Amino acid sequence: MENLNENVTEQQQNGGEQQPGEDAVKTGLYKMLVPLETAREEVVAWLDYKRVKPSVRMNNVRNIMKLVEAVMYSIITIDPDTKVITHKLEFPILNDKGGVFAEKLTYKPRLRMEDLSRAEAAEEGITNGIGAALTGQPAGVIGKLDSEDGAILASVGVFFIL
């Protein structure tokens, strides 16, 4: 997993300090709260807990980097004991009246085959079905996620269907 560090921007490797010539890569709203190495270790520990094989990791480097970045910016946290992932939504899920329905999701660390069978049968599609199985929320609610939050859900979910 040493190759993961090669995919991180120079700004992230230098503790978030802006380097000369980095005007094209602005972090805007984001402030790195967790150092790269710590975030990488947390994600690798989660993958180890799930017993994700090296070949699967190599085929999913982009998903792993998405998770590392999300940890760095405290968008997700991984409980070190239970391996439950808490996802602070960048765009809260709204109810039909425009009020906030959910500001965060929690992802289970393990799923049973029956959970995946229900996910595959979800009328809202496999991604929403897996999201529902991981979070305990209805697939229709998962379908209301913004694409930015959905990308994080997908980066977690991919390790449950391989």
Image (cartoon, grey):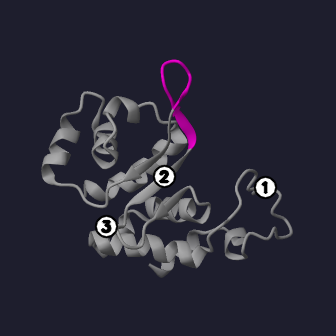
| Picture coordinates of residue 21, whole percent (x, y) | 84, 65
Q: Is 46 within the magenta?
A: no
Type of amino acid at the residue the image marks with label 3: Val
Q: Write the residue at 73% across / 76% down.
A: 14
Find out whether residue 95 is within the magenta segment.
Answer: yes
> Dot 2 surroundings within 10 Å: few (below 14), some, or many (20 or more)?
many
Relative to 138, is 99 above or below?
above
Label 1 CA crowd tier, 10 Å (few <14, some 14–19, many 20+): few
User: Cα distance, mark 1 to mark 3?
Assistant: 32 Å
Q: Earlier in the sequence, mark 2 or mark 1?
A: 1
Side of 51 relative to 89 (left or right)? left
Rounded to the nearest angstrom, the CA distance separating label 3 from label 2 is 23 Å
Give the residue at x 26% y 72%.
Answer: 51
The CA distance from mark 2 to mark 1 is 28 Å
Judge the density around disc 3: few (<14), some (14-19), many (≥20) Cα neighbours within 10 Å.
few
Name the quadrant containing residue 27: bottom right
Q: Amino acid at mark 2?
A: His
Residue 24's disc is: 1
Indicate the position of residue 155 as horizontal and vertical percent values.
42, 54
Q: Nearer the viewer, mark 2 or mark 1?
A: 2
**SS of the residue under disc 3:** helix
Residue tagged 2: 87
Q: Which residues are magenta?
A: 90-100
| Residue receiving disc 3 | 56
Residue 27 placement, left or right of 146: right
Judge left or right: residue 4 versus residue 153.
Answer: right
